[in-house]
Amino acid sequence: MFLSDGCGAMIANMDVTVLGGGIGGLACACALAQRGARVRVLEQAPALQEVGAGIQISANGLAVLRALGLEPAFLARSTGNGAVELRQGQNGARLIRMAMDPGAFRFVHRADMIDILAEGARAAGVTVETGRRVAAVNLESSGARLDFADGTGETVPLLVAADGVRSVVRPVIDGVATPFFTGQVAWRALIPGTEGAPEARVYVGPGRHLVRYPLAGRGVINLVGVEERAEWAEETWHSPADPAQFRAAFAGFCDGVQRDLALVDQVHLWGLFRHRVAETWHRGQVALLGDAAHPTLPFMAQGANLALEDAWVLADCLAQRPVDQALPMYQEKRRARVARAIAAANDNARNYHLSKWWQVGPAHTALRMLDRVAPSAMVRKFDWLYRHDVTA
Ligand SMILES: Cc1cc2nc3c(=O)[nH]c(=O)nc-3n(C[C@H](O)[C@H](O)[C@H](O)COP(=O)(O)OP(=O)(O)OC[C@H]3O[C@@H](n4cnc5c(N)ncnc54)[C@H](O)[C@@H]3O)c2cc1C
C-alpha cells in the first residue's frame, strides 16, 4: 500500500499545505502524507461535505485509490457498473448495450467518496482545518502568502491548490481566463429506488440526454439530465431548481423516464462551461491540481478521476525530486493527457445531442449495427483513458 523505504525521501518531513478538501485535495494530502510529508488541508466549508449526487469512478481513478490503500473501503461503499445502455429517449428503444467490467467502473455517492479519502488522509497523519476560506494568494520567495477571509494571514512553504473550478490560485499562476457557457445545463437529482440492474442507462434525444444509475448502498438512483438551452445557469452544484422545470425539459421522453421524474422532489441545476486547460500548472512553490487546473465537461465522467490521477503524480514527483524540478515534471506528465481527455469530453457532448433528422437517423442505425456486431468497441476505443494506470 505505501511506498517502499526511501521512495519518499525528497518530501519526507516537508510542510505542505493543500487548499481545498475536495476529491483532488484529500487524495493528494493522503498521498503526500503517506510519503512522509507533514500535510495540512484548508477547507472553506464548516465541515468536509459534499452535495447529494453520484459520480462514476473508472479503472484509472480506482488505480489511485488502490495505491493509496483505500480500495477495500471504496469497493464496500460503491456499486459496480455492469453495462451502459444507450436508449432512444422518446420511445425507450435500445440503441446499444456495452458490457462493462463492474470491477473497473463503479458508481459512488460523492459524500462517501469524500469520507473514504478523508479517513485515509487522517490515518496517514493529515490535519484538516475547516472554516478556513482563503480570499487571496500571493507568491513570495519563501512560498505563498495566504490571506484568509477572516482577516488573518500566513505564509506557507509549499502550496497545492486544489480549490476547484473557482480557484483563487489559478489566476495567480496562469492568468485570468474567461470560460464560455456551452449552452448546456445539467439537472441533477437523487430519487428513492433500488430496483433495476447495477448499470447506467443513457436516454438520448435531440438537444438533451438523461443518465440514470443506482447508488445501491444508499438506496437511491442518480439522475443527471443535460439539456441544450440558451438560458444561462450558474456553474455550481448548489443552485436549487424547480423539479417541474426538470420534468418539462424531458417531457417528450418515454414512460420509464417519466416515472423517474415523477419521484424528483429536489433538483439542482449546473451550467456547463468550457474552460481552457491551464497552460502553466505551477509557479514558485505552488502547484494547481484537479478542477483548479482543468475543469472538464462531465461527458466522459472524468473530472474526479483526473483529479485523483493528478494527486498521485504530484505526490510522486515531489517524492523523487526537489520542488523546483518536481513541479515542472508534474506538469509535463499530466498536461497532454488531461487535454486529450477533456477534448474527448467536448466531442461526446456533440455525439449525444445530434439534433438534425439527417444526423439522428444514420447515427442511430449505425449504433444498432454496432450493437449487433461489436458492442464493446465503443468502450475499448477509450482504453487509453479508462485503463491508464498512473501508479504503475
Ligand atoms: C454534472 C456533473 C457530473 C459529474 N460527474 C462526474 C463523474 O461521474 N465522474 C467524475 O470523475 N467526475 C465527475 N464530475 C466532475 C467532478 O465532480 C469534479 O471534476 C471533481 O469534483 C473535481 O475535484 P476537485 O477536488 O478538483 O475540486 P472540488 O471537488 O470542487 O473541490 C474543491 C474544494 O475546495 C474548496 N475551496 C474552494 N475555494 C476555496 C477557498 N478559497 N478556500 C478554501 N477552500 C476552498 C471547496 O469548498 C471544495 O471543497 C462531474 C461534474 C458535473 C458538473
Image (cartoon, rainbow, N blue to C red):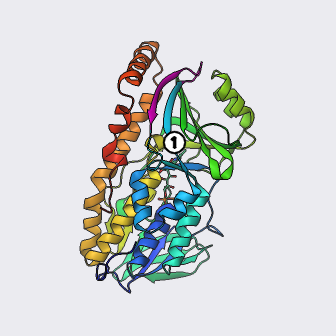
**Residue 268 can be seen, yes or no:** no
Nearer to the camera, 122 or 18 = 122
* Quadrant the C terminus occupies: bottom left
Residue type at the position of mark 1: Leu
Question: Badge 1 is on which residue?
Answer: 272
Image location (x, y in percent) of residue 143:
38, 79
The residue at 34%/51% (across/down) is 338
Q: As displayed, is residue 27 above or below residue 154?
A: above
**Is residue 379 visible to the viewer in this orientation of the structure?**
yes
In the rendered image, residue 349, in percent from the top left (x then y), is placed at 44, 34
Number of labelled discs?
1
Q: Which residues are magenta?
A: 88-99
Q: Secondary structure at mark 1?
A: strand
Q: Position of residue 348 (x, y in %)?
A: 41, 34
217 within the magenta span: no
- Left or right position of 265 against 364: right
Label 1 CB less than 8 angstroms from ligand 1 = yes
Q: Position of residue 248 (x, y in %)?
A: 69, 27
Left or right: residue 292 versus residue 319 is right
Q: Residue furthest bottom?
A: 13
Residue 98 is one of the magenta-drawn residues: yes
**Mark 1 neighbour class, 10 Å CA radius: few under 14, some 14 to 19, many 20 or more:** many
The quarter of the image holding the N terminus is: bottom left
